[in-house]
Image: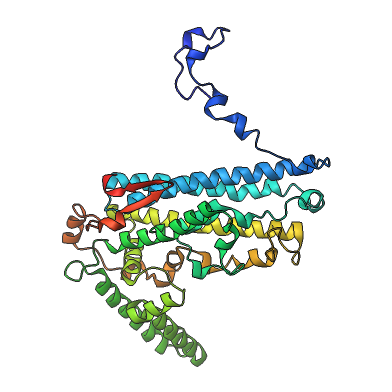
Amino acid sequence: MSCPIGNRYADEQDGAQLGEEAGMLYGEYLMLDKVLGAQRMLSKVHNKPVHDEHLFIVTHQAYELWFKQVIFELDSIRSVFSVPMEESQTLEILKRLNRVVLILKLLVDQVMILETMTPLDFMDFREYLCPASGFQSLQFRLLENKLGVKQENRVKYNQNYQRVFGDDPEAVKRIEDSEKQPSLVVLVEKWLERSPGLELSGFNFWGKYQKAVEKLLSEHEKLANECTVEKVKKYRLMDLEKRREVYESIFNPLIHDGLISRGERRFSHKALQAAIMITFYRDEPRFSQPHQILTLLMDIDSLITKWRYNHVLMVQRMLGSSQLGTGGSSGYQYLRSTLSDRYKVFLDLFNLSTFLIPREFIPPLTADFKNNLCYSGYSKDLPEENNKITNGNCTINSNKI
């Protein structure tokens, strides 16, 4: 690694030692004395050193460092999403979201390294861990909250997940702050609601889409009724009726709101309309980057689910299905329960394919609307209170970004 502050003494590298005036060295800049000295093996403290405990510590410390970076990226992304964005900011969001995706891929694969430790190896030092538990990872809870995991969707553990931090007022405050601040899913929802093309007086995508669906279903009903095999005809008509019900769930705002109240949908009705529109017209220059953003948001949800799944398998391998976790949870059983859709923040994006229609039925963009897209943006002023996001101890006014 080259010197992070530049090499001002490039001509003096022929064996000469840098003096104090040269500035910080590699180890000083990275504070490696603290980082590399932070692996305290409890088995060694108890005069029973276990080789694999070192791997266990380093792996989890690496997780926490990457969690810190993901939170850093999410805070910056949320700040940009808080206000109407220019095209250059959209590119920056794509870059940072992609970075988060790559970090999460790394975390998913990192589980395999921990799995080189056998259950017997883990048992040799597990007794020293109690009551420490991964459930007590403050940063992972902050990460979940900043993404948009709601407390009511969490699997109950000792009544409230904050309870494990009860002896740490600062940790509790950070969690409470993260719950009060607008999460990424809320900010993305507001951003989608500002999408051009949803206005009734303009392109009116939703009205055109409803007509296209009605036309599609009418044609399928006609084909079904023309079928001469009664059993096949009955099946096709029954399937068609189910599809009508599915489409009715998005065309009827009351049904949609009911699904939100039951936790089966997340986005507002207007935000869902925008997500469907962006998916249809993703090949259009104006909707290409928004579609990439939606794809990366799904990737984040997918990778966190994969990480949870890999973690569940590892815990089952190490502890079996009945042994309690070191923090007092039900271990494998608790972790397995976190794999449900209730933990998916961008659940609606995964379900968009339910509402797709063949390309030939997608309403074509009008010339006027295409022209307007060149000049319009996701641009309605937001209230000042929605534009402040706290990053650590610093409050950012995102209007100034």
247 lies above or below 185: below
Question: Could you tell me which residue is drawn at 33 percent across and 56 percent down?
Answer: 283
50 lies above or below 331: above
**At which x and y percent is residue 1?**
54, 25
396 lies above or below 381: above
**At which x and y percent is residue 55?**
71, 42
Quadrant where the C terminus sits is top left
**At which x and y percent is residue 196?**
24, 61
Q: Nearer the viewer, residue 166 or 158?
A: 166
Residue 252 appears in the rendering: no
Residue farthest to the bottom, as pictured: 230
- In the picture, measured across the screen, residue 119 lies left or right of residue 257, that is right
Question: Could you tell me which residue is drawn at 62 percent across and 57 percent down?
Answer: 135
Question: Could you tell me which residue is drawn at 51 percent across and 69 percent down?
Answer: 153
Q: Nearer the viewer, residue 233 or 95?
A: 95
**At which x and y percent is residue 375?**
18, 52
265 lies above or below 218: above
Residue 387 appears in the rendering: yes
Q: Nearer the viewer, residue 101 or 186?
A: 186
Q: Nearer the viewer, residue 173 or 388?
A: 173
Quadrant in which residue 61 is drawn: top right
Quadrant in which residue 92 is drawn: top left
